[in-house]
Amino acid sequence: MIMKGKWIATLFLALVVVLAGCSNGTNETVNNGGKEAVEGNNGGASSTSKAVWFSSIDFWNPPTTWSTDPNTVQGAITEKTGLTFEFNIPAQDGDTKLNLMLVSSGEAFPDVITITNDVLGKKLIESGKVWNLDEFLKQYDPESHLLTDFPTDVKDTIIERDGGFYAYPSHINSEEARAQYPPSGQFYVDLVDYASNNTLVVNENLLKEAGLTLEDIKTEKGLLAAYQKIKDLNLKVGGAPVIPLLVDGKSYQDPTLQFLQDSFGAMAVDKDGNYRDRLLAPETKLALEFLYKANKAGYFEPGQMTVDNAAVKADMASGRVFTFIGNSANTSFQLNDYWTSSGPILSDAGTKPVLGKSKRAGGGWMKTFISKSAKEPEKLAKWLSYMSRKEGMLTHIYGFEGVDYTVDGEGHVIKTEKGIKDAADYMKTGLSAFWPFHHTSFSYSTQQPPNEETDLQAVTANRVQSAYGKSPDTVIYDNSPLVLPGDLFPSDSKFANDELQVKTYKEAQIAKIILSKDDAQFNKLYDEMIAQLKKLGIEPLDQERNKYVQEKKTEYSIDVKGINS
C-alpha cells in the first residue's frame, strides 16, 4: 500500500489520529442477533437487518460486537438505518482473502467491502459484483445528498481511476470540499499545508533528562550523538532500559525509510525532471546509511523490523522510547503530551530535505464498495447516505451533543473530556471508529480550532506532524504528477512481473544492507543492490513510468524537478 503523496488520508490522519489508531487483530463479530425490533427512523424498516462488512485493512478495528443501544454510536446508526454489522477483518493477507472470495462460488460475498488497494478495486469492479454508486443511489435512495452535493473534483478523480463512481472515499479533502466546509481556523489551514504522518517523534521528557534540546538533534550527526548519550547514560523507565530509536515495525521500509529519504532529499525525479525510482537516488544511500549506523551502534534492535503494529504502539505507550521514526498516526503518540519533534534530520552531506504534497483532489485512502448481492440494498443505500451526511458524521465522529461534545457560540464542536477519552478507546466505544467515512474537510470545518485547554491531543499531534513541513530547511513541492496508479502495468505484462521481482528483491536486500556488520559490507551490499535492480529491469520500468509522469506534468502544468540530484 502506498500512501505517500495521497494527502487526503495523510492530512486528515494528522489531526484525527486522536480519533483513530491502528493495531493488528481480527474482528470476526458476533452480532447482537440478526433481526431485532428497533424504534425510530430507520428508513421505513420495522426491524434490524445484519450486513457483513469486509475490510482488508488489518489495523482497522471497529468494535467487534455491534450494540443496538441507541445511546451508543452503533445503536444510533442502527436506529437511523435499520442495520447492524458483522465485521470480517482478517488479521493478515486481507487482499488475498478478498481475491479468493472473488473466484469462490461457495463463500457468501460480503455486503460492504472496504480496501485501500487500487488494483484490487479494479478487480472488484471488473468482476461485476459491486455497484456503481450513482446507479445504486438513484435506484434505492434517489433523494440521497450524495447525488447532488458530493465534491465534483473528488468524484472526477475517482472516475478517472476506476471508470465510474464505484467507491466511496475516506478522508475527503479538496478545493470543492473546503468550499462546502470551510476551515474553522488557521490551525486547520496549517494542517493542509504542512502536516505529514511520517515524522521523527521525540520524547521531550527523556530529551531533558539527557540534558539535550531539540536544537541538539536537528542534524544527522547530532541525533546519532544523542542516541549514544542516551545509551551511555543507561536511562531507564519503570526499570526497563530506554529505547534510543524505534522504527515502524515490519512496515519500516515504507514510513521509516520514506521519512529518511525525504529528510536526506531523495526524490522520484532527477534534476532534469525525469522519473527515477527513489531507490536509485543517491540520497537513498544516505538514508540507508543512517539506519545502518543506528543498528550497528545498538541504538535499535533488529527485532524491531519484524514486529506488528501492536508491539510498536505498546513500546510508544511505555514511555521508554526516546525517538520514533515512521508513521506517527499508527502509534497513538498523541495520548501523551510529552511528544514533540525537531523536524527533518539534516544530512551531514548537506542535501536539502524535501516534502511532496499533492494539491489535486484525491480518490480516498480507504475505498468502500457496495455488493450487488447485498440482501438489503435499500437499507444500505440509506446507510451510505446517512454515514456521509452532516448528521451522521457528527454522530459517528463526535458522538452525542452534551455528552461527547458541546457547541460554541459560532457553532463549532468542542470535544468533552469523555468524548476525547471514548474516541481514543474507539475499539470499544465505536466513537470515531468508522474511518471509511471520516471526512477531512468536514472535521476541519466543524471542530473549534483546538488549544491546550480544549484538545491537547490535537495540539500535540499537530505540533509533531507539522514540524517537518514548517521547518525553514524543508523544500515543499507539488508531487501530483508523481503519484502513479497501482495498475500502470497490466497484470499479465512483463513490466508487472519485473516490478514484482524488483519489489521482492529490494525488501530482502534493504534489510541486509541495514544489518551490515561494517562499512565495507554496507557499501558492497548497497552496490550489489543497485546492480541487481538494474539487471531486474528497474530502468525500463522507470522509462515507462516517466512517460506517464511527463503526460501528467503537462496535463497538470506542474514542472517538478529534483532538488538535490
Image (cartoon, rainbow, N blue to C red):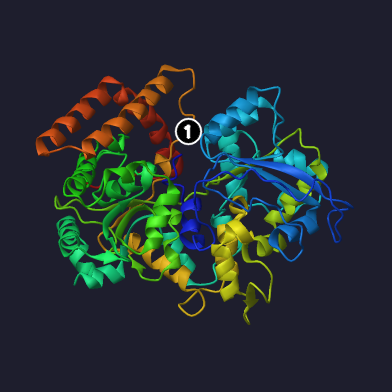
| Depth order, front residue of 471/548 | 471
Q: How many marks on residues?
A: 1
Left or right: 457, with 415 as reference point: left
Residue 422, position as x, y percentages in the image: 59, 66
Q: Amino acid at mark 1?
A: Gly
Q: Is residue 269 above or below residue 214?
A: above
Q: Secondary structure at mark 1?
A: loop
Circle 1 packing at 10 Å, graded few (<14), some (14-19), many (20+), is some
Residue 13 appears in the rendering? yes
Q: Which residue is mark 1?
A: 486
The part of the image, by quadrant, that contains residue 227 is bottom left
Question: Which quadrant of the figure contains the C terminus?
Answer: top left
Residue 526, position as x, y percentages in the image: 19, 33
Who's the residue at 76% across and 33% down the image? 373
The part of the image, by quadrant, that contains residue 469 is bottom left
| Depth order, front residue of 498/21 | 21
| Depth order, front residue of 334/219 | 334
